[in-house]
Amino acid sequence: MRSEKTGRSKAILEAIYALPRQDAVLMEVCGTHTMAIAKAGIKSLLPEGVRLVSGPGCPVCVTPAEVIDAALALSMDKKILIATYGDMIRVPGSAPGDSLQRRRGLGAEIKIVYSPVDAVELARERPDREVVFLGVGFETTAPGTAAAVLMAKEAGVNNFSLWSMLKTVEPALRALIGTEGFHVQGFLCPGHVASIIGERGFAFLPRDFGIPAVISGFEGEDILLAVYLLLRQMTQARPRLENEYRRAVSKEGNTLAMNMLARCFRPRADIWRGLGRIEESGLALREEFSDFDAERKFAVKIPLPTKTACRCGEVICGRLRPGDCPLFGGRCTPEEPVGPCMVSSEGACAAAYQYQAVD
């Protein structure tokens, strides 16, 4: 099986090199793509002049420092238990070294969970605490978060609440394309998100901006084929949306999941690291679920942003490569991260550091 895959990958590479030579900056939006590209050494295989850069597709990485600061403050409330994913616990706020992990050492009650439903079960088990789930993610994880809220409401688990840090991809990409100096000629679109929102969720890229787009799977062969399809579109000067990940992504997407999202959430403005405030890019709980809205329940206040040495915002917008950051590999390592891109399992800096994929 491995030899078959190697043979197919070799054939795709040969097809890439057979295309007319061209310079191209291609952005992989998804953090899972970023890690897969680094692990497979794909950047080193591509022709000179073809560059892959990271985009705003790592949920932990796009959560701004001031939101982390607010979560740190909330965690010190003695009646609150914070439930969150493993990556979030080590993400620093504005102050170097300050994280949920540090706050746990100071007495905050913080639990790592593997799903939002686990947080609801934790609230059942701990009626003496208000369990606040920090819900980060995009359209991929948002349906599971909606399911947890519905479960809590139906079961009357009133000591559970959600702090929705959920975001949607399209508004962020529109905002990114509109930034000064935007220089990306093609997008590798995230297969996980597309499995929920469908092919049509990324049709705006060629339609509204004339930018080639390919929905890609996560194997090395998937990514190489997506790169080939993007370069071929550029050669043909016919930007369009292609779906390389047909085994998981349909045109319409997962209508059940989308209906669940629409039932629980409404769009709202949200803040993105590196991109600032973007209208209708976040997901807030609808009014009927307000009793489960942690921001309302605990009157959460987001502090003003403070300047930090972290350059993650530029990395996830494709403006800076991880190795170009003066902190990379020195002051900022996976053991002592300065920014979220070095913490997350989908972070561009973590990928570059782990696989020495600095280009």
Image: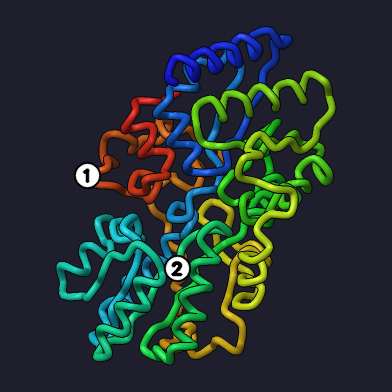
Kindly indicate the quadrant of the structure image that contains residue 290: bottom right
The number of discs equals 2
Residue at image point 31% right, 48% down: 338
Could you say where residue 116 lies in the image, as x and y percent from the top left? 41, 69
Could you say where residue 323 lies in the image, as x and y percent from the top left? 40, 30
Image-based side of 1 in relation to 19, left or right: left
Residue at image point 49% right, 88% down: 154
Asked whether the residues under the numbered discs 2 and 1 touch, taking CB atoms below 8 Å apart as contact, a structural biologist would say: no
Could you say where residue 283 lies in the image, as x and y percent from the top left? 59, 70
Outermost residue toward the front in this view: 1
Give the crowd class for mark 1: few <14, some 14-19, many >=20 residues within 10 Å. Answer: few
Image-based side of 6 in relation to 189, left or right: left
Q: Which mark is residue 135?
A: 2
Q: Which mark is residue 294?
A: none
In-front residue for pair 80/322: 80
In-front residue for pair 285/67: 285
Quadrant in which the C terminus is drawn: top left
Label 2 and label 1: CA atoms lie apart by 24 Å
Residue at image point 34% right, 28% down: 355
Residue 309 in view: no
The amino acid beneath tag 1 is Glu
Kindly indicate the quadrant of the structure image that contains residue 55: top right
Answer with mark 2 or mark 1, whichever residue precedes in sequence. 2
Kindly indicate the quadrant of the structure image that contains residue 278: bottom right
Image-based side of 227 in relation to 242, left or right: left
The amino acid beneath tag 2 is Gly
277 versus 294 height, above or below: above
220 versus 300 height, above or below: above
Q: Secondary structure at mark 1?
A: loop
Quadrant in which the N terminus is drawn: top left
Residue wearing tag 1: 335
